[in-house]
Image (cartoon, helix red, strand yellow):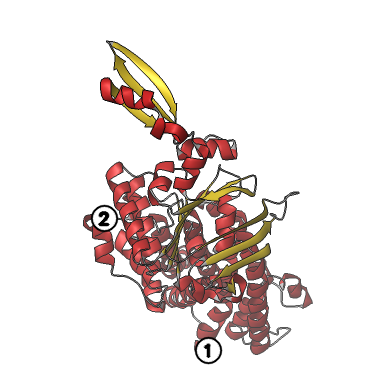
Amino acid sequence: MTIKYLIYELKKWVRDPMMIFLLAYPVIIASVVRFGVPYAQEQFQLSVAPYNHVLAAVLMLLTSAISGAVIGFSILDDRDDKILYAIDVSPVSFDIYMGFRFIMSFMLTYVGSVVALLIANLGGIPVYALLLVPVGIALFSFISAMFINFFASNKVEGFAMMKAGAMIIVFPIASLFFTDYKEFFFGFEPNFWAVKALSVAMLPTLEFNLGFWTYFTVGIFYAFGLNVVTYHIFKKRIMI
Amino acid sequence: MFKVSDLRFRYPKNQVDTIKGISFEFDKGEIFGFLGPSGMGKSTTQKLMIRILKNYQGEILYKGKNLNSYDKSIYNDIGVGFEMPVLFSKLTAMENLKFYRDLYPEGVKIRPLLERLGLWEDRHKRVAAFSKGMKSRLNFARAMINDPKVLFLDEPTSGLDPTNARIVKDMISEFRHNGGTVFLTTHMMHDVDELCDRVAFIADGQIREISSPKDLKVRYGKREIRLEYNDDGVASKQVFDLNSIKSNEEFFGILRTKDIITIHSGETTLDEIFIKVTGVKTHE
């Protein structure tokens, strides 16, 4: 069932031009970073190397928001097609059905983030950070998929919600410019913890309030807990 | 098969009950019609019986056990044909049925089902490109995909041309003859007359009448025979009491001596019974 379900889901994605564009978006942005940034540095005699951790964070956060939108739109499609009624009267539970979506959003964001970082080829990302930080980021994408479905009942509304929801990534990006206690002001946003862990890994000479593992672990637990709470509200909101 | 006793239900934001203490039952191998005007509790009752709605008062028994005591495997026995198509519009007919069949431990073969419903040639077409009638037929196929024992059907012939409506009705009849049980909700009184063993009329959350279509038509009809005949070049009509017809010489005299144009009994139609019992016309 699992593999077949994934195949049906992928078929739905590739048959929707907007979904294809969204899936390609992180690759396009990563390519722009890879080729556009060195060109700009050369043209304007600038060095963005000290801000590589910011560029890496932006890439991952965009990937997470886009993956969340893909999954969020897919759930909106199911709601349009009244599929949740059929799931409700089948032996498969709503939780399992949505569980597949969670796994897909996690995998899509994780793989997308790693691939985007590899394409962008930013220097200074240790392998352990390249593989671990996207785990924390990937836990956020399903929250963003649920957020879209809280307020939208069709794709047009969903697109507006995606843009509104994506604004929240401004907070973790802003937090990258603080290293004292003021950074915790941005800690409510779950991605804050992951991008801070990335900063610690990429800027080993700088002093931070916490170490890589503390930022990383708190981020994982926080994002996971937020998924559980959000899911309960989401379920009540969209269940028949 | 199903026994509903003193069922009551109120939607969370409502001030009054939508279902006001209804009781009925139907057996294995029966087609039970559940009829009523829109917004009078018909769909709510069906949603309670298939557990889409919960938190009701009263009791619903399935095979003698409380419905709430079953886990989700109860749906292996049940097929639900919703009024609106419940299909992935971006997937093909074949992909839709395969997806739904994979939700169940067992299912039927897809090809005979689609061939019977005239959809085999279009199996690789996306549902978004289907007409209303094609979606309706595929929706019926979806309800049958798990080889259910009980079918809940809401307007199964809605949007179908007479030929395809005939096919669907024949399939429902065959399902019953093979031991299946059907809970049928429809406004099509002709379908009810043709298919249902018994019917219940619901209005304002209460059951107003339960019986077989035949019994209802006799009870709500008039015990009379209306005769129209040619009386020396003039069309004449006469009504005779059915209770004394065997000794009515005038009636038999007309039959023997006049050219009969039409003979009608006073038996009524389910449409008229619907209006009389629920107080609402069937198209509402």
Classify residue A2 as left or right of residue B58. Answer: left
Mark 1 and mark 2: span between their CA atoms?
54 Å
Instruction: Tell me the mark number nearer the camera, choosing from 1 and 2.
Output: 2
Label 2 crowd (10 A; few <14 / some 14-19 / many >=20): many
The three-letter code of the residue at mark 2 reads Leu
Residue B116 x, y percent position in the rendering: 25, 58
* Residue identifier under label 1: A128
Element on which disc 2 rests: loop
Mark drawn on residue B245? none
Residue B65 x, y percent position in the rendering: 58, 74
Element on which disc 1 rests: helix
In the image, what residue occupies the spot 31% across and 54% down?
B170
The three-letter code of the residue at mark 1 reads Tyr
Mark drawn on residue B119? 2
Report the chain holding disc 2.
B
Residue toward you, A28 or A111: A111
- Circles 1 and 2, Cβ within 8 Å, touching? The answer is no
Residue A228 x, y percent position in the rendering: 65, 75
Q: Name the image quarter holding residue A238.
A: bottom right
Residue B283 x, y percent position in the rendering: 49, 36
In the image, what residue occupies the spot 32% across and 50% down?
B134
